[in-house]
């Protein structure tokens, strides 16, 4: 497996990008330069899409077992290079060893699920309203898919589009986030090259959004754009794709709710909240943004949560027992600190943390927060927890649904039916009772509502997204067309 990631990958070849600019990739904890890649420009992007389109024609016709073998081989390559991949996640994405290991496992599960897809491209034969006619419905690959991968879970959130797309007969062009070009893109070029994927079916263009960001969407070749990232960028992609009548699969921001009802097991809820808030420094679209706690148990929950959050080890992600590592870059730290200051000015109280050194923001907890403060209104995407009290089911449902996001969430209650009833009333794509919101299983539909995205990933749902249907009918006997029939020939 190739480990020199200073070049881009087009049509099965590792080449220098044609742009005048370079992409310097650094470790977010140490600042160390990892690799510098000559960036791709619009000509490189065009070459990648052309290669993908040409290769896809033959790949779509390949036997399903051939497609499956490539996916299974890619899985083997990843398992053989597990330590290498985890090391890259730690040093490039700022992942703790714990998070990188879990992300690797989730990616393996995606490959296992995708390996079943070539034999799940099911069609139908349906009756017709006309005598002697047979209606057939075929499921076909879309063609070429453009993938824009994020920096927070780059390996997992890239492979969940790459593997299904290739498994069912598509080709892909990947533009990884500028902070994670290796784990969000170039690693997959190396993995699938070693797995024997035919040339042209997977291409990776490392480039600046300002140079090729719009064009990866606007280019006439891709039939679908898969994007994971912020809501503003996702809306821009949706506008560009919609103008060209392309499909989109968008997983966007989530101002996720964590609701602790008055009868909840506080210790269990604290367990869930700690994981759902501080896992990967809170840099997860599913991470908890607002923790709503019933006023009757608010102080009890706050004291236990703060005490345990204060014991979390933060700092160097390469150390095995570190639980909270660095944010991806200083801009993220400064953005969050600004919202903390603004919320404090409006009456919130910092009960733990609030300080940062370089890109490491220590675990932070604020109480006295209201639902209209900046930390509640904005997606935090960092290791900052806010606790908001409520007095009734109606109040917490209104507050939970106050913002135009709906990705994931959680409700804690000793009464399962009570918790489930609340969960039904939260406008979100995913929600979990007596658990935390950071859940993703390769066979379950993953996606959001409202400003949190369009479409679903994983299982049969991503198969539906990345394929198209064709109605083909066969008229087995001569059909009568009424007034258009020439009766003189009878």
Image (spheres, rainbow, N blue to C red):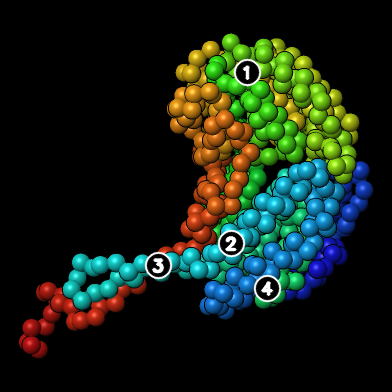
Q: Could you say which disc has been placed on residue 123 in the image?
A: 3
**Residue at x-position 63% and y-position 18%:** 388
Q: Quadrant of the C terminus?
A: bottom left
Q: Give whichever of discs 3 and 1 has the lower sequence position.
A: 3
Q: Give whichever of discs 4 and 3 has the lower sequence position.
A: 3
**Label 4, on which residue?**
197
Q: Give whichever of discs 2 and 4 has the lower sequence position.
A: 2
**Label 2, on which residue?**
114
Is residue 73 depicted above or below 88 in this figure? below
Q: Secondary structure at mark 2?
A: helix
Residue 392 visible in the picture = yes
**Direction from residue 467 to residue 159 in the image, left or right:** right
Q: Quadrant of the N terminus?
A: bottom right
CA distance for labels 2 and 4: 15 Å
CA distance for labels 1 and 4: 51 Å
Is residue 341 depicted above or below 157 in this figure? above
* CB contact under 8 Å: marks 4 and 3: no
**Label 1, on which residue?**
388
Q: Give whichever of discs 1 and 4 has the lower sequence position.
A: 4
């Amino acid at each position: 497996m190739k480990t020199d990631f200073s070049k881009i990958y087009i049509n099965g070849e590792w080449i220098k990008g044609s742009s005048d600019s370079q992409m310097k990739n650094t470790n977010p904890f140490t600042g160390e330069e990892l690799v510098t890649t000559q960036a791709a420009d619009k000509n490189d992007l065009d070459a990648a899409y052309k290669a993908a389109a040409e290769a896809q024609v033959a790949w779509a016709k390949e036997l399903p077992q051939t497609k499956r073998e490539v996916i299974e081989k890619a899985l083997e390559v990843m398992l053989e290079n597990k330590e290498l991949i985890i090391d890259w996640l730690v040093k490039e994405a700022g992942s703790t060893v714990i998070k990188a290991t879990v992300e690797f496992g989730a990616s393996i599960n995606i490959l296992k699920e995708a390996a079943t897809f070539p034999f799940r491209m099911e069609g139908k034969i349906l009756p017709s309203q006309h005598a002697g006619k047979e209606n057939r419905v075929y499921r076909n690959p879309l063609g070429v898919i453009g993938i824009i991968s994020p920096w927070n879970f780059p390996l997992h959130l890239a492979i969940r589009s790459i593997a299904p797309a290739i498994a069912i007969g598509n080709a892909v062009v990947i533009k990884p986030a500028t902070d994670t070009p290796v784990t969000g893109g170039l690693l997959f070029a190396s993995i699938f090259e070693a797995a024997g994927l035919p040339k042209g079916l997977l291409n990776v263009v490392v480039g600046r959004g300002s140079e090729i960001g719009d064009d990866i969407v606007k280019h006439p070749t891709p039939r679908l754009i898969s994007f994971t990232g912020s809501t503003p960028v996702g809306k821009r992609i949706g506008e560009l794709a919609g103008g060209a009548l392309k499909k989109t699969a968008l997983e966007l921001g989530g101002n996720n709710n964590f609701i602790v009802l008055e009868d909840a097991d506080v210790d269990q809820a604290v367990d869930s909240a700690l994981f759902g808030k501080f896992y990967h420094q809170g840099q997860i679209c599913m991470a908890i943004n607002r923790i709503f706690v019933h006023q009757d148990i608010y102080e009890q929950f706050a004291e236990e949560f703060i005490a345990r959050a204060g014991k979390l080890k933060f700092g160097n992600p390469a150390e095995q027992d570190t639980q909270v590592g660095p944010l991806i870059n200083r801009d993220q730290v400064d953005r969050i600190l600004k919202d903390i200051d603004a919320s404090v000015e409006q009456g919130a109280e910092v009960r733990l943390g609030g300080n940062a050194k370089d890109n490491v923001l220590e675990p932070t907890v604020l109480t006295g927060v209201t639902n209209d403060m900046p930390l509640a209104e904005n997606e935090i995407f960092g290791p900052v927890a806010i606790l908001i009290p409520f007095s009734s089911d109606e109040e917490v449902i209104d507050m939970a649904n106050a913002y135009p996001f709906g990705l994931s969430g959680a409700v804690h209650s000793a009464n399962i039916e009570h918790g489930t009833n609340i969960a039904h009333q939260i406008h979100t794509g995913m929600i979990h009772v007596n658990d935390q919101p950071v859940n993703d299983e390769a066979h379950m539909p993953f996606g959001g509502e409202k400003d949190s995205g369009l479409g679903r990933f994983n299982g049969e749902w991503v198969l539906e997204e990345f394929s198209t249907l064709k109605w083909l009918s066969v008229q087995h006997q001569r059909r009568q067309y009424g007034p258009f029939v020439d009766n003189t020939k009878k």
